[in-house]
Image (cartoon, helix red, strand yellow):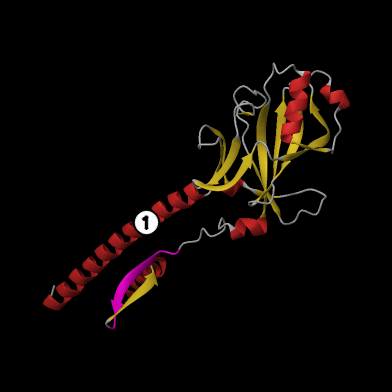
């Protein structure tokens, strides 16, 4: 092997090593980016101080609202109910919880004060076995959440036969009415099953801004240039393939 051949061989080896190191570094950065994006997409429903966590789900699993009410601008995120209808483990104890908080990526996006929400009963939907009423809680217009879907109970015996589906009532008024019928012996629990977001508000609150491009800084012609790393890797691989 001549000196020039050896020099070309060494240069090719060094180039391949540098390319492999660059690819490895990019893979590490992309893995960290994916992890960070996933964390930012986690929606949690918590108590006043962030604990306990009553519900957790990734916004990746949200779906466009599908019903007959022309809600094309709404997105619904459903939560795994865990043990389902066990109100002792899966719900908010409304008697001792002044506030419900919703966070995304650890950032508070909306709060619900127990004294304020206006609720609506679902027409003719009542869980007789667990004495729970299906309800919607209005989002209140102070955040991206349009409504909260859930179940409230245990309600007084016979509630299902006389409730007025579709009527609105302030949550605190409902709790007082139920407490009177229950002689204040049975605290009420709320199980949240889904949150509905308005898509345009989701964008305003920054939820859709998850695309981040990794850049490398290189000195070209005496100037620092930021170039997307995936472009650099793809170009280098193409050059290597072309040079054989």
State which region is magenta. Answer: 213-221
Q: Position of residue 137 (x, y in %)?
A: 72, 40
* 150 versus 35 height, above or below: above
Compared across the picture, whether 220 is left or right of 192 comes to: left
For this rendering, which residue is in front, 3 or 96?
A: 96
Is 185 drawn above or below residue 94 in the view shown? above
Asked where in the image residue 135 lies, by quadrant, the reply is top right
What secondary structure do most residues of the magenta stretch adopt?
Answer: strand
Looking at the picture, tell me which residue is in the foreground, 82 or 172.
172
Residue 111 coordinates in the image, percent (x, y): 60, 44
In the displayed structure image, the side of residue 108 where residue 88 appears, left or right? right
In the rendered image, the residue lying farthest to the bottom is 221
Answer left or right for 157 relative to 104. Answer: right
Q: Residue at x 65, y 23 (%)?
A: 86
Residue 17: x %, y % from top left:
25, 63
Residue in view at x 70 percent, y 35 percent: 150
Q: Secondary structure at mark 1?
A: helix
Residue displayed at 62% across by 55% down: 202
Residue corresponding to mark 1: 29
Quarter of the figure with the C terminus: bottom left
Q: Per the image, is 217 magenta?
A: yes
Q: Quadrant of the N terminus?
A: bottom left
- Crowd tier of the residue under label 1, counting other residues whose Cα lies within 10 Å: few below 14, some 14–19, many 20 or above: few
Which residue is drawn at the image coordinates 22% and 66% (left, top)? 13
Q: Is residue 201 above or below residue 79?
A: below
- Asked if the magenta segment contains residue 135, the reply would be no
């Amino acid at each position: 092997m001549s000196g020039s051949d050896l020099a070309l061989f060494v240069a090719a080896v060094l180039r391949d090593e540098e390319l492999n190191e660059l690819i490895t570094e990019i893979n590490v950065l992309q893995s960290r980016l994916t992890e960070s994006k996933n964390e930012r997409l986690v929606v949690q429903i918590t108590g006043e101080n962030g604990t306990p966590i009553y519900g957790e789900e990734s916004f990746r699993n949200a779906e466009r609202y599908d019903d007959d009410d022309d809600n094309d601008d709404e997105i619904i995120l459903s939560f795994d109910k865990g043990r389902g209808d066990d109100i002792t483990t899966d719900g908010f104890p409304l008697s001792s919880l002044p506030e419900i908080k919703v966070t995304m990526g650890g950032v508070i996006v909306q709060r619900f004060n127990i004294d304020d929400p206006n609720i609506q009963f679902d027409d003719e939907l009542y869980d007789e076995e667990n004495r729970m009423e299906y309800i919607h809680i209005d989002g209140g217009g102070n955040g991206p959440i349009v409504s909260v879907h859930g179940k409230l109970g245990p309600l007084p015996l016979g509630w299902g036969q006389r409730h007025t589906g579709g009527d609105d009532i302030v949550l605190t008024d409902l709790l007082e009415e139920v407490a009177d019928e229950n002689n204040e012996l049975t605290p009420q629990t709320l199980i949240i099953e889904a949150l509905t977001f308005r898509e345009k508000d989701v964008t305003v609150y920054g939820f859709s801004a998850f695309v981040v491009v990794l850049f490398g800084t290189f000195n070209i012609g005496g100037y620092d240039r930021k170039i997307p790393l995936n472009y650099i890797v793809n170009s280098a691989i193409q050059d290597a393939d072309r040079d054989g």
